Image: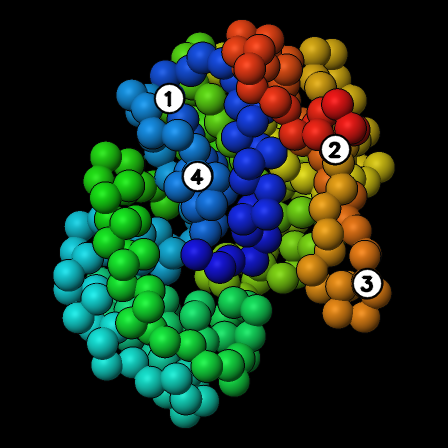
Amino acid sequence: MSWIGGKKALRELIVSVFPFYYERYIEVFGGGGWVLFHKSPGNDFEVYNDFNGLLTNLYRCVREKPDELIEALHFVLNSREDFDIVKNALARDSIESDVIKAAYFYQLIRYSYASGLTSFGSQPHDMWSNFPLIEQAHRKLSKVVIENKDFEKLIRQYDRPISFFYLDPPYYETEKYYKNVGEGGFQEKDHIRLRDTLMNIEGKFLLSYNDCDFIRELYDEPNIRIESFTRINNIKQRYDNGAQFQEILIANYDMQERKENNPSQINLFEIENGL
């Protein structure tokens, strides 16, 4: 599902550097769920979390009431007037039905500009084409625990030596783009609080961030590994062909351990560097 900061383009890279072994998979800043839905199904216990209550309500309805959600989406209109009605209803928090609230929110995601939820996108989109995707997501989420908690509380709740946390927080100095999606805004103190929380866990973590001095200095700690890479900058591509965006992955384990335990697997860092 399209979402601010979604990891559609990076999911293969991210999954390729997962730890070789874990029994609990916890996605702390779930967003569009691109990594969760892409990772291979296994016997591990899976948790999806997001602080946005509208988003977690949508996923709960996909998991528990997919037919009702699809039925509600049969009647949505791709129009500016309908978009504004739905947006205002969600802002007032006046919708009692969890299914209708989920349908409204899904409509807002699909019909807003760049899935930003604030302005009408004025683009054609066949809502019915999403129904098979909802059914697929329903099957994937059938055994996934869905949480709506602050990251620190969630990490402390699920931390065990066998736990693996994947985290994709709002990137540093891009936090303003998240204030209109049901969140109060991620601040510098939250980046520091996240670091402090992760430095004291028993399990393993993998963290996605933009490459900047502040984050690198924040995680300049013993036994912390940082790998850098580039990706196409989709926004700048519109006026600067070939523009790239610098990102990093941060982990408290060796990001090559999966490859070392499974030599046939090619790591995408190697692909980027020409093997």
> Gap in Å between the C-alphas at discs 2 and 4?
20 Å
Is the C-beta separation of discs 1 and 4 under 8 Å? no
> Gap in Å between the C-alphas at discs 1 and 4?
16 Å
Q: Position of residue 178 (x, y in %)?
A: 58, 59
**Label 2 belongs to which residue?**
272
| Amino acid tagged 3 | Asn
Task: Please report whichever mark, 4 or 3, sits nearer to the chain's N-terminal start.
Answer: 4
Q: Where is residue 125 in the image (x, y as percent from the top left)?
A: 42, 77
> Gap in Å between the C-alphas at discs 3 and 1?
41 Å
Is the C-beta separation of discs 2 and 4 under 8 Å? no
**Label 4 belongs to which residue?**
38
- Which mark is nearer the camera, 1 or 4? 4
Does 108 sit above or below residue 7?
below
Q: How many labels does the image show?
A: 4
- Which mark is nearer the camera, 1 or 2? 2
Q: Can residue 226 be seen by looking at this rendering?
A: no
Q: Is mark 3 on a helix, strand or loop?
A: loop
Location of the C terminus by quadrant is top right
| Amino acid tagged 2 | Glu
- Front position in the image: 201 or 133: 133
Q: In this view, does 236 lie to the left or right of 10?
A: right
Q: Which mark is residue 241?
A: 3
> Gap in Å between the C-alphas at discs 3 and 2?
19 Å
Task: Please report whichever mark, 3 or 1, sits nearer to the chain's N-terminal start.
Answer: 1
What residue do we see at 70% from left, 17% from top?
A: 224
- Determine crowd level at label 1: few under 14, some 14-19, many 20+ residues with C-alpha closer than 10 A: many
- Determine crowd level at label 3: few under 14, some 14-19, many 20+ residues with C-alpha closer than 10 A: few
- Determine crowd level at label 2: few under 14, some 14-19, many 20+ residues with C-alpha closer than 10 A: few
Q: Residue 24 carries which label?
A: 1
